[in-house]
Amino acid sequence: MNLMSVLAALVAYLIGSLSFAVIVSRAFGLSDPRTYGSGNPGATNVLRSGSKAAAIVTLLLDAFKGWLPVMLVKWFGPAYGLGEGTQALAGLAAFLGHLYPVFFGFKGGKGVATAVGVLLAFQPLLALATLVTFGIIVAFFRYVSLASMVGALFAPAYYLMGHGVAWTMHPPVLLALLAMGLLLVWRHRENIRRLLAGTESKLGAKKK
């Protein structure tokens, strides 16, 4: 790993550390999403504020901050000798920035939208396959948290299906996908407990 790779990862982490749930909520004059609902600074919790527009903007920006660092390396990295390894590192660093943002006390969101942005930058078809999986799980079970975790765990499998044994020659993206998947599941550990207890909220279910 050279100095430029380290700098790319650092910039990616700083971009990922922009907690758009908090920034957008402030811009819309809404309460800090860390103070209500699940306390999670993400688009789903912003939606609980009653502002669909703020939630959509948050979702798009969270995905964008995962997509941008990888694309910057793709666009400008070759001139500095940066390849797929640095792209994978940048994607993982942006994801970690969302989970543990340096600008917001290292208390971030669960990383679903940011992970999708990273996948989109890695390979659009990979992102599409993962989103289709997410949609199928939501349609059948109506648990967004479950769909998020299943999608995250299926992403590395889809990558292997698309590359076969060739991944052994270029493993960085696969390793980044595995790391993001495991971290995303870890961040959903409270949701897992509620799923097992049968108390997890279903999409579209009215609160009692």
Image: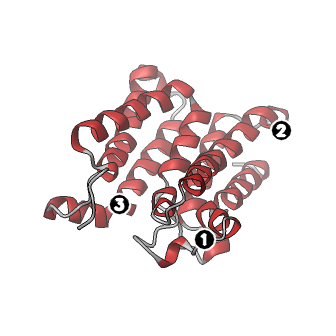
Mark number displayed over residue 188: 3
**Left or right: 82 as drawn, with respect to 66:** right
**Label 2 Cα crowd, 10 Å radius (few <14 / some 14-19 / many 20+):** few
Q: CA distance from mark 3 to mark 1?
A: 25 Å
Mark 3 or mark 1: which is in front? Answer: 1
Three-letter amino acid code at the position of disc 1: Leu
Q: In the structure shown, which secondary structural element does the residue marked by tag 3 occupy?
A: loop
Q: Is residue 78 above or below residue 179?
A: above
Q: Earlier in the sequence, mark 1 or mark 2?
A: 1
Mark 2 lies on residue: 80
Mark 1 lies on residue: 30
**Label 1 Cα crowd, 10 Å radius (few <14 / some 14-19 / many 20+):** some
**Left or right: 167 as drawn, with respect to 75:** left
- Residue 185: percent from the left, percent from the top? 35, 55
Q: Name the residue: 47% across, 37% down.
A: 174
**Left or right: 104 as drawn, with respect to 149:** right
Mark 1 or mark 2: which is in front? Answer: 1
Q: Earlier in the sequence, mark 2 or mark 3?
A: 2
Q: Name the residue: 70% across, 66% down.
A: 27
